[in-house]
Image (cartoon, rainbow, N blue to C red):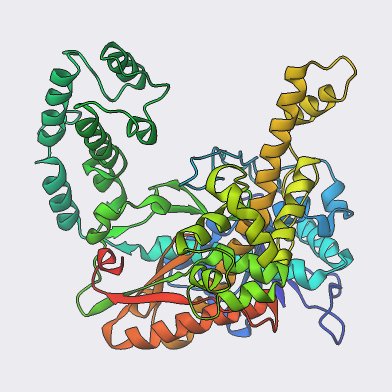
Amino acid sequence: MHIVLARSADGGVVATRFVESGDDGGNELGIEPVAEPVSDLAAFVRTEEQARPRWVWDDTSRWYPELLAQHVRVERCHDLRLCHTILRYSQLTSGSALAMAQHNEWDAPAVAIVRREPDGALFELDERQEPGLPTDPLAEFRLQRAAVAASEEPGRIGRLLAAESAGALIAAEMRFAGLPWRAAEHDAILTGMLGARPAVDGERPAKLQELLTRLRELLEAPELNPDSPADLVKSLGRAGLIVTSTRSWELKKLEHPAIAPLLEYKKLARLLSANGWHWLDTWVVDERFKPDYVPGGVVTGRWATSGGGALQLPRQIRGAVVADDGWKLVVADASQLEPRILAAMAGDRDMVTAGAAGDLYAGIVASGAVETRDQAKVAMLGAMYGATTGESGRLMPRLARAYPKAIALVEHAARAGERGEIVSTRLGRSSPLPGAGWQQAQSQAYDETATQAQTARARSEARSWGRFTRNFIVQGTAAEWALCWMASVRRRLTALAGERWLTDAPHLVFFLHDEIVVHCPAELAHIVADEIRAGAAEAGTLLFGPLPIEFPLTVAIVDNYGQAK
């Protein structure tokens, strides 16, 4: 049964029940439903939850926090806004009325693609505006149901919608519970690295000021402001050091007495700005860090955050994440997740076998494809991210001979991207089309009047988009696996909790792409660790069926997050 919740014109709540018809639980909705007013939302949901309905609402972040505040949890939901975005762009539902309709208030704002350095994430959230208030969730629900029903693979896309909606519930619960955080420990870490907290906001801590003094002396720049890239480039230039940016990887190539203190200054300044005392005052309340997670905030389906920077917690401050007295943190991360996802997607049994012993890269070496583990890692990263030069370019042919199915899969996705075509993940999330500028560049390249520069630009942009689609299918499917993993773990932890409230029992408190953290009573820690491992196995089966692919986890039971690494 589905129960659609909506806001009425006067600000109240109305509920509409749907009971699926058909012996096979198919996609047809039951008889025409009737909306009923709800005077007490928390009491209504608490009562109806006993029948295990799937709650349908416009946006989980608008409904669920209110229920959690009243100590009401729900088992399942259907997040219309998140699901609309998937169905709007998925190749599996491209012929539906929803996909072909004009954009409206249900369409999530565009998520821009931002390219990062090779050692960082490729695709991150750039900008997301607050969506407008949607209208008529009942009509939207009908459209979404029809889109799934008409799909050639309704089970596949339906599983993605269920996983995405489960992720929305988990995000709200993690924000409600918060990540255990010792403010005093955080302050001690900052003081040890930066010096005492300045008495006046905006002043540099002692260690930063000492480094600044040294830099000004070494560069003979008494007015240097190293926080200004333009000022720093000029000062380095006057010292005979020519750079095009102030990125650390470029500075490390230079030889000068000022480089070491400059790199140290940049590292500490980053800590101060991203997770310093101002961050601590803003985001840690009552010994809990409560960031704003954005499920599906990245085009690949990865999460983002709109506040708090939870997905970028530096190692220096993880020691401040401390379990409550008598409790433990169970930290689990999936080993070499994306290469394993690639092997499973391609059905490349030789690559699956290479990872069966635990270390996939060591398995690749054992197969004779390459000589060293470092070479295996570089080659795999090149395959997934499209590196065609240097060491990875040299090793790629050897990897292709050893694992032809896996390499053919990403190469096919890359060629599709270069042609401006769409690719899809395992469960059916599809990539966006390249923008108008890309299309124009390609058109100009095929014009008989095209210049050599225009042709070169078009080829470069085509290859760039090919690198995006190459990685989209792997990163996006890894995100789907992680959603299924978390959903399984959440269900298992709920069973362990029995009648206890969310924060009185084992509960998820943190998620980072391929890593989760559970806060639990110490006596349950080993049971929780086993449930987390079982959840990973279940996620693999949900996505890849009987294929004998394993997703091994590194699991640590610790008192603070810093001990897990």
Q: Where residue 199 sits: x, y (%)?
A: 9, 34
Q: Where residue 453 sits: x, y (%)?
A: 73, 18
Left or right: residue 190 compared with residue 540: left
Left or right: residue 81 compared with residue 440: left
Asked where in the image residue 525 lies, by quadrant, the reply is bottom left
270 lies above or below 469:
above
Residue at left offset 63%, top offset 61%: 399
Asked where in the image residue 92 lies, by quadrant, the reply is bottom right
Q: Quadrant of the N terminus?
A: bottom right
Q: Where residue 238 sits: x, y (%)?
A: 28, 11
Work out whether residue 129 or residue 152 is closer to the camera in this orientation and state it. Answer: 152
Residue at left offset 27%, top offset 83%: 522
Tag count: 0
3 lies above or below 399:
below
Q: Quadrant of the C terminus?
A: bottom left
Q: Where residue 467 sits: x, y (%)?
A: 66, 45
In the picture as drawn, the residue positioned furthest to the top comes out as: 238
Work out whether residue 260 or residue 103 is closer to the camera in this orientation and state it. Answer: 260
Left or right: residue 272 compared with residue 33: left
Residue at left offset 12%, top offset 23%: 213
The answer to whether residue 17 of the structure is visible from this angle is yes
Work out whether residue 83 or residue 347 is closer to the camera in this orientation and state it. Answer: 347
Residue at left offset 69%, top offset 60%: 407
247 lies above or below 105:
above
Work out whether residue 124 or residue 119 is closer to the camera in this orientation and state it. Answer: 119
The answer to whether residue 198 of the structure is visible from this angle is no
